[in-house]
Each structure stands twice: as structure tokens, then as C-alpha cells.
Amino acid sequence: MFRAIADPTRRKILDELTERDDQTLFEICSRLTMRHQITSSRQAISQHLELLEAAGLVVSRREGRYKFHSINPAPLEQIVERWLNHRTKESS
Amino acid sequence: MFRAIADPTRRKILDELTERDDQTLFEICSRLTMRHQITSSRQAISQHLELLEAAGLVVSRREGRYKFHSINPAPLEQIVERWLNHRTKESS
DNA sequence: TTGATAGGCAAGCTGCTGCTTGCATATACT
DNA sequence: AGTATATGCAAGCAGCAGCTTGCCTATCAA
């Protein structure tokens, strides 16, 4: 999970999914190319998505030949709990 | 900064500094060895601390031949701002 | 001044990460 | 059935990250 957000391309993917949910691999690819000048191949992005999904940061939903991806920022709360919530302790 | 927390040893260092501030390199080394079974050399930990300091997550204070390290979790707020604060917007 | 302690610098090695390439599978359309 | 589209699998490769090793500097104590 920490490794997942260590890569700049993967962070851009999370940004993209934050802005717009339910995107397919090809949508993400084209939007990354258009708006972030990322020239990676489809397979590269696919592998990034696999890793993000394994980290629990992305959830996917299959629909026919399409696979829609959405962001799940919940695992990131670990960071808050671990290092940021030591003075302002609230309900988790 | 994201790369800084991608390494498990560096995360342990942050944990250690969260628990107890103002530690020297040797203190951190011995505590990592004792309590977390980390067998890395002094130089390895030194390099980790350099990276953490470059990321702004650790601040240091020189005192004679000692160098005291403390945690600064502020940069981690970026993560909250970027992906977690999109529904509950509060003053930071 | 000499020795011991705390830390810094730099080169070299190894394993892993991210990427590409090539092929395979599955679904939809006609 | 045949073709196009959307995605998956796996091998191979280049670059870098983390570690070690060896030596150097600086401060303190005797």
C-alpha cells in the first residue's frame, strides 16, 4: 500500500479516479496521456492498476468486456492513524 | 516524500520517533535493532535519515557531536488533502 | 596530544521495479 | 462464423534503491 503510492504514475491514476469514478483501462490510459503527458503503454497502466487494486486503493467492477475502476481511499487512513492522529484523537 | 514512506525500515524509524523525539543516530540504530529486529548497519540508517530529512519528515538539531532527530508529520497532510479531504472539507 | 565516540562521504554490488514486447482470452458486433 | 475491441498473462530488460565496506572528519575526555 505504501509502495503503491510511491510511484508518480500511480498517484496520477488516483488523482484521475478521484476526479472521475468508474473508468475503464482505456479511458484511464487516454486521459493520462491527454492531461498528464504520460506516455506509458496500456500494459504498464494495467500493471499499475493491478498493484493499486492489490493495495486496496482501487476497486473494480466487471461489466461484459469492460472493467470499471474506482478509487477507495480508505487504506490511506492508516497513514493518518499511524502518524497524524497522535494529538487530535477522534473516532475512527 | 512518497518514496520516503515506501520503505518499511523508514516507516519503523518514523514510528520510533513518534514514540520518542530527539534521538541520535546511535539511539535510533540500537532501538531499531532491539525492538524491531532490524539488522541494518549504522550507515544504512544514516542514509534513511538523510532521505527522511530531505522529504521534510524528519528535522534534526545539532548539539556538539550529537545530532538529534525528531519527526515532522506535516508533509503527510498532503496525502489527506489530496485524496481524503474530498467530502469532509475542514480548516487545516 | 592522544584516544574514543558520533557522524559523514563515496564507491560498488545486488535485487527489485517499472516498462516493453508478444501472445492469449473474452466479449460484442455483423 | 469471423472480426474488432477490451483486457490478461508472461518473459525479458534497463535503471535505480538500499545495503555494505572503507575511510574521513569532528567533538569530547584524559
Image (cartoon, coloured by chain):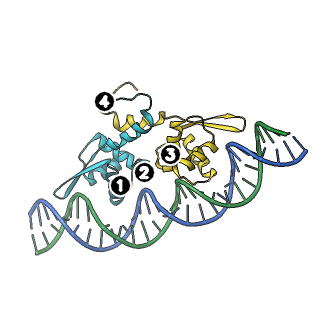
Chain colours: A yellow, B cyan, C green, D blue
Residue A79 image position (x, y, % from top left): 40, 38
- The residue carrying pointer 3 sits among few (fewer than 14), some (14 to 19) or many (20 or more) residues within 10 Å by Cα, namely some
Nearest to the observer: residue C6 or residue C22: C22
Quick one: SS at disc 2? loop
Residue occupied by mark 1 = B51
Q: Position of residue A53 (x, y in %)?
A: 57, 40
- Report the chain holding disc 1: B
Find disc 4 in the rendering and name its residue: A88
Alpha carbon of mark 1 to alpha carbon of mark 4: how far?
Answer: 27 Å
Q: Secondary structure at mark 4?
A: loop
Task: Please provide percent x and percent y for residue C22.
Answer: 73, 60
- Asked whether A21 or D23 is in front, the reply is A21
Vertical arrangement, residue B72 with respect to residue B41, above or below: above
**Marks 1 and 4 close (CB-CB < 8 Å):** no
Q: Chain of mark 4?
A: A
Left or right placement of residue B31 versus residue D28 in this view: right
Q: Is residue A72 left or right of residue A29?
A: left
Q: Secondary structure at mark 3?
A: helix
* Eye-nearest disc, 3 or 2: 3
Q: Which mark is residue B3?
A: 2
Badge 3 is on which residue?
Answer: A12
